[in-house]
Image (tube, rainbow, N blue to C red):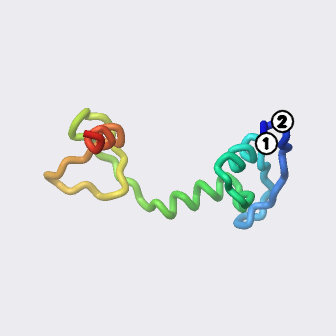
Amino acid sequence: MCSEEYGDIELKCENCGQPFIFTAGEQQFYAEKNFQNQPKRCKACRDARKQRVRGEMFHSVCAQCGQEAIVPFKPTEGRPVYCSECFAQMRSN
């Protein structure tokens, strides 16, 4: 199905009660991923929920490339921390 076969739908967020638009593009994405249910939360509430689930993030410097690394754990003194790109590269080797 192409996005022209979908139409924007107005939904109500179950958290904040505000209306939000479930766009045709989002509907197509949901269909491609075989998601069965429409979203229940607006983008702001989804983002807030993700942040709560992920917890606190910590800033550090990548031990390999020197770029900023944002990690979901408190870095320990003397142990290297890697940015996501360097970490992925190390895992693939």
Front label number (2 vs 1): 2
Q: Which residue carries the number 1 mark?
A: 24
Left or right of 26: which side holds 61?
left
Kind of residue sitting beneath label 1? Ala
Q: Pinpoint residue 91: horizontal percent, then vertical percent.
A: 28, 44
- Disc number at residue 85? none
Left or right of 10: which side holds 59?
left
Identify the residue shown where x is 75% and y is 61%.
Answer: 13
Kind of residue sitting beneath label 2? Glu
* Placement of the C terminus among the 4 image quadrants: top left
The picture quadrant where one finds residue 56 is bottom left
Q: How crowded is mark 1: few (under 14 residues within 10 Å), some or many (20 or more)?
A: some
Identify the residue shown where x is 33% and y is 39%.
Answer: 68
Identify the residue shown where x is 65% and y is 58%.
Answer: 45
SS assignment at label 2: helix
Q: Is residue 92 positioned above or below 11 on the image?
A: above
Determine the residue located farthest toward the left in the rendered image. 78
Determine the residue located farthest toward the bottom in the rendered image. 14
Q: Verify CB contact (< 8 Å) between mark 2 and mark 1.
A: yes
Identify the residue shown where x is 30% and y is 35%.
Answer: 67
Q: How many labels does the image show?
A: 2
Q: Which residue carries the number 2 mark?
A: 4
Q: Pinpoint residue 52: horizontal percent, then vertical percent.
A: 51, 63
Q: Pinpoint residue 5: horizontal percent, then vertical percent.
A: 85, 40
Of residues 55 and 39, the one drawn nearer to the viewer in this rendering: 39
Q: Pinpoint residue 21: horizontal percent, then vertical percent.
A: 79, 49
SS assignment at label 1: helix
Mark found first going from the N terminus, 2 or 1? 2
Q: Is residue 7 positioned above or below 20 on the image?
A: above
Of residues 33 and 86, the one drawn nearer to the viewer in this rendering: 33
